[in-house]
Image: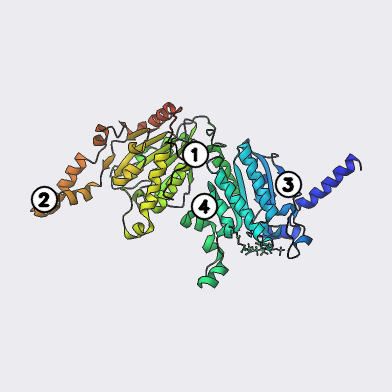
Amino acid sequence: MSINSKTQELKQKMKVALQGGGSKAIEKQKSTGKLTARERILELLDEGSFHEYDLFIQHAGKDFDMDKKFLPGDGVVTGTGTMNGYPVCIYAQDFTVAGGSLGYMHAKKICKIMDHAMMLKTPIIGINDSGGARIQEGVNALAGYGDIFYRNTMASGVIPQISVILGPCAGGAVYSPALTDFVFVVDKISKMFITGPDVIKTVLGEEISQEDLGGARVHAEISGNAHFFAESEYECFEQIKDLFTYIPWNNTKKAEPYESKKPKSREYKIKDIFPTDPAKPYDVRHIIRSIVDDSAFLEVQELFAPNIVVGFARIDGQTVGFVANQPIALAGVLDCNSSDKAARFIRFCDSFNIPLVTLEDLPGYLPGIDQEHAGVIRHGAKILYAYSEATVPKITVILRKAYGGGYIAMCSSHLKADFVFAWPTAEIAVMGPEGAANIVFKAEISASDDPVKTRQDKILEYRQKFANPYVAASYGYVDSVIEPNETRSYICHALEVSKNKVATNPYKKHGIPPF
Ligand code: HXC
């Protein structure tokens, strides 16, 4: 056979394999508003950069007539390419081939590209669209999931791991995304649950639709399993590309620097955003935008636990991770969900050399029976643990309230913040003046002829004595009391001088965080 005819033979084999599940299955996939696995990869990666591997892998199923079935690529597309010019490893499950179900060889392909990513120190992106463990392959399918989960765990904190849920992701399959750093979901397309509506109805007698059980909104707003929510696959791909401009390619690198840009100061003026009345709420995201380059802020888990805001921005061209209490949601309190959200984000930033900027304005941890019984002690401890352990540059700005446990938890100097700045509006105290006056001056207030006036006087006295930044500054717990308009320049300087920060924690195999 000549080289030409051999090449023709290759082309023919490729053509068959690239058809995936065939035109009917592709039509069905499209009719549900979904792209195919290869279309998704091509949309996401830089044009012409994708190289596919293991196209000719065949499944290993023998039972239930599986040996008579041809499953092109065994239902998953794997390869390498570039995004924004930088290398990535990627896989996309192909629902048109046996519902993207995961058999032994399908899992081997995924593990192989994950091993590649670890060896080459590139991020790994997994696009999930699958009916779960391939039922005909029994324990070999389960083994495949176990092999993936192990690799997800080993890769955690070494390379960024991104999961994109673009179809069903059911049963044990959900645990690979759960072990990765960022989960992207798309409205009406993503479905994630450990057991579907049919099983729930049989076992518990409860009726619910797939969408209400594990649709995109559920995971973005209620469960917190998803970090980014999009209206369409295309919007989701833009979100992923945007995220990749902020994060480094592995844990030995820093994020790529960009050209420094000034904030859009006409749109985001601190004096217009920040209320003079300390009881009034404001949107802390506007404060972030007033500080950062080009006022650009990529919020993570925007719809979940909105009482804390986390996300990426750049200051003087360098990526930073923001953690900020949000006064417009539950007055910015820390509760179980917001503690989990912040702790996880802090750990991502620390693993990937991203300095942390904390903006503080909170009345403390949320009291109440629900929170206590939900484990606010354990969940709240996560944020303490994450900040204490983080060795990246840590810069805190106290904008207004810093009361009680909240003061300590939001990256205080006691948790080894490198710089703590406070606005003159800061109130750093064990609790708010109203609550404090009721307790400390209880006897005086009740013995007074005019208890209302006495209470107001005592609140004022307490506020003047403690609810300010100067007592904390007098002990050195605050490094500088700054004018709000100076915030960006103080942060810029702090980042500049902490560029070469090297901090190590005591040797240990690993700590035992309050998981
Ligand atoms: C084998 C599967 C499959 C599976 C789907 N298919 N899921 N084949 N194993 N798990 C096949 C179907 O037989 C069908 O093949 C094709 O994929 C398309 O499936 P449809 O059912 O026609 O598609 P649709 O109507 O869109 O429904 C999608 C679905 C449904 C909701 C995902 O297929 C479904 O419920 N699948 C089973 C989900 C599940 O229970 N998985 C196991 C979870 S247990 P043909 O040949 O007809 O085209 C698990 C344990 C892992 O994952 C534990 C690890 C720790």
**Residue plotted at (67% across, 41% down):** 80
Residue 361 in the figure: left or right of residue 243: left
Residue at image mark 2: 444
Using a 10 Å C-alpha cutoff, classify the residue at mark 1 as few (fewer than 14 neighbours), some (14 to 19) or many (20 or more). Answer: many
Residues at badges 2 and 3 in contact (C-beta under 8 Å)? no
Which of the marked residues, 1 or 4, is nearer the chain's N terminus?
4
Which of the marked residues, 2 or 1, is nearer the chain's N terminus?
1
Q: Secondary structure at mark 4?
A: loop
Percent position of residue 420, x then y? 34, 34
User: From mark 1 to mark 3, how far is it between C-alphas?
Assistant: 32 Å
> The residue under label 2 is which amino acid type?
Glu
User: From mark 2 to mark 3, how far is it between C-alphas?
Assistant: 80 Å
Say which mark, if any, is on residue 351. Answer: 1
User: From mark 2 to mark 1, how far is it between C-alphas?
Assistant: 52 Å
Residue at image mark 4: 226
Which of the marked residues, 2 or 3, is nearer the chain's N terminus?
3
